[in-house]
Each structure stands twice: as structure tokens, then as C-alpha cells.
């Protein structure tokens, strides 16, 4: 589903060249749950941005469902993000003035087909799945951290993405809430959803089927394991 071939990304900082991604090769199959780990500055967030088509490589190839996206322009990348990707962030990124239901529906407002009654029905179904049926009209400041992340997960799924990209999805949550969120992500993966997650927490990474460790812009270790 995803193939990276010799992907490079460099930045110039104070006259110094930083190799954020250095000849990265990676394949992610449909239905996999992959955790990307590494210290700060290892390249894991840059890799996630690359996978999410939020950045373009300086060299190498990125194939998504056999379509090369490496050289696409911004408008094309935006269309790919909307069609293929769902995003979950550490800080939730919910709009405070919108209700739970409106936040989940937000990506549909930017879809080429516009917002439909079917979208509203799907949003309600997703919120029921994340156990938030009784919070549809609430606003983010009326929710706990775990509930906000559940809203973010429902929002990530509204466009029926091929890939869900999660950036430290439990970083702002306590341990019991983190486990509940990871159980939900694992349940989605068991249903066939492809998930790529960045985390610095080994116990969170254990929920994934495959762990990738990065250092200095390179993948230095890969390990597959049985999940919880």
C-alpha cells in the first residue's frame, strides 16, 4: 500500500545541513498497525509528515497504492490527504466553537462532494462507536481529554481513509485513558484499518504489530510482534 524508496529530506539550519530523512526505505501493507519510535530529532515526525503528504521529499520515491506522490504539487497533495488520510494529533486540534458532531463532520465540508445527510449519519455512527452518543452537542471544553481524543478519532475516520496517521495520540492522557484509546485503535486495526503511529512510549508501541526505530534520519531497527 505504501512504499518509500530512498526518501531524503534535508533542512538548512544556521548554515548546517540536517538530514531529517536519510535514504529511508519502508513498506507498509494494507491493514498493518505500525509504530514509529525514536528520540527527539530522530526523524520520526518528519517521516509521519511525509507519509501524510504534508511534506515533499528532496529525493527518492513515495508510492501510495502504486501512485507516485513524491512530485505532486500542493493542490494534488491536499486532494490525496483528503481522500486517503485520517489524522489524529496529540493536542486533539478540535475547534472550540464547534460541537462534537460538527468537529467530526469538518473534513467533509472540504470534500469535493460537500456535506450530505449520509455524512451526518456516518458521523453519528462513528461517535456511537467511540461511546460519545450522549455528547453530540457538547463543545470540546466540556469534555475530558480522553473524550476529546475519541472525537478526534471519529473525525479521522469520517472520510473512510486508507491510512490513519496518529502523532503521539496518548501524549496528553493519563495511563488508564491511554490504554482505552489504544484498545480502540487496536479494535479499528482488527477491523482492517491501516494505522501508522508515532510514539516515544514503549508500552504504547507494543499495541502495534510492527515497531520501527529511527535514529539520525534512518531506520535502524524493525521488529514484528504479537499484539495485546
Image (cartoon, rainbow, N blue to C red):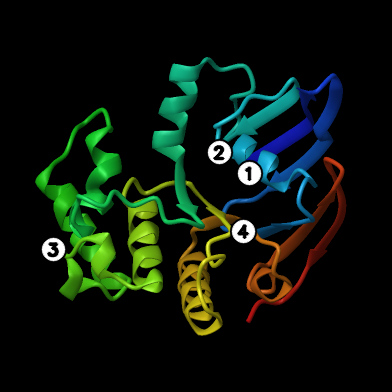
Please state the horizontal and vertical placement of residue 197, each as a whole percent of the image. Answer: 61, 57
- For disc 4, the marked residue is 32
Q: Residues within 10 Å of mark 4 (few under 14, many from 20)?
A: some
Q: Nearer the viewer, mark 4 or mark 1?
A: 1
Judged left or right of residue 75, residue 13 is: right
Say which label, 2 or 3, has the lower sequence index.
2
Q: CA distance from mark 4 to mark 1?
A: 15 Å
Q: CA distance from mark 1 to mark 2?
A: 6 Å
Q: Nearer the viewer, mark 4 or mark 3?
A: 3
Tally the numbered discs.
4
Q: Circle 1 sits in a helix, a strand or a loop, which is it?
A: helix
Q: Are marks 4 and 1 in contact (CB under 8 Å)?
A: no
Q: Are marks 1 and 2 in contact (CB under 8 Å)?
A: yes
Q: Are marks 2 and 4 in contact (CB under 8 Å)?
A: no
Please state the horizontal and vertical placement of residue 223, each as a whole percent of the image. Answer: 82, 64
Q: CA distance from mark 2 to mark 3?
A: 30 Å
- For disc 2, the marked residue is 52
Judged left or right of residue 154, residue 8 is: right
- For disc 1, the marked residue is 48
- Tag on residue 115? none
Q: Nearer the viewer, mark 2 or mark 4?
A: 2
**Of 82 and 215, which appears nearest the observer?**
215
Give the quadrant of the N terminus.
Answer: top right
**Of 172 and 112, which appears nearest the observer?**
172
Residue 101: quadrant of the picture: bottom left
Q: Residues within 10 Å of mark 2 (few under 14, many from 20)?
A: many
- Depicted 77 relative to depicted 163: above or below: above
- For disc 3, the marked residue is 137
Q: Are marks 2 and 3 in contact (CB under 8 Å)?
A: no
At x 25% / y 40%, what residue is drawn? 108
At x 21% / y 61%, what residue is drawn? 139
Q: Nearer the viewer, mark 2 or mark 3?
A: 3
Amino acid at each position: 500500500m505504501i512504499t518509500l524508496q530512498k526518501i531524503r529530506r534535508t533542512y538548512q539550519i544556521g548554515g548546517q545541513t540536517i538530514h531529517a530523512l536519510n535514504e529511508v526505505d519502508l513498506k507498509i501493507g494494507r491493514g498493518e498497525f505500525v509504530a514509529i519510535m525514536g528520540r527527539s530529532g530522530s526523524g520520526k515526525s518528519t517521516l509521519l509528515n511525509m507519509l501524510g503528504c504534508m511534506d515533499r521529499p528532496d529525493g527518492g520515491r513515495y508510492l501510495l497504492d502504486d501512485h507516485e506522490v513524491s512530485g505532486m504539487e500542493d493542490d494534488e497533495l491536499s486532494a490525496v490527504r483528503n481522500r486517503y488520510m485520517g489524522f489524529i494529533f496529540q493536542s486533539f486540534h478540535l475547534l472550540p466553537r464547534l460541537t462534537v458532531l460538527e468537529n467530526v463532520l469538518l473534513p467533509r465540508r472540504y470534500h469535493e462532494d460537500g456535506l450530505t445527510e449520509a455524512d451526518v449519519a456516518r458521523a453519528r455512527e462513528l461517535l456511537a462507536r467511540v461511546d460519545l452518543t450522549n455528547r453530540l452537542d457538547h463543545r470540546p471544553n466540556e469534555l475530558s481529554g480522553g473524550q476529546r481524543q475519541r472525537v478526534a478519532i471519529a473525525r479521522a475516520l469520517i472520510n473512510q481513509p486508507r491510512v490513519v496517521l496518529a502523532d503521539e495520540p496518548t501524549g496528553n492522557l493519563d495511563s488508564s485513558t491511554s490504554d482505552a484509546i489504544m484498545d480502540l485503535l487496536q479494535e479499528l486495526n482488527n477491523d482492517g484499518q491501516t494505522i501508522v503511529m508515532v510514539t516515544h512510549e514503549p508500552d504504547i508501541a507494543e499495541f502495534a504489530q510492527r515497531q520501527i526505530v529511527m535514529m539520525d534520519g534512518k531506520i535502524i531497527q524493525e521488529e514484528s510482534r504479537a499484539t495485546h
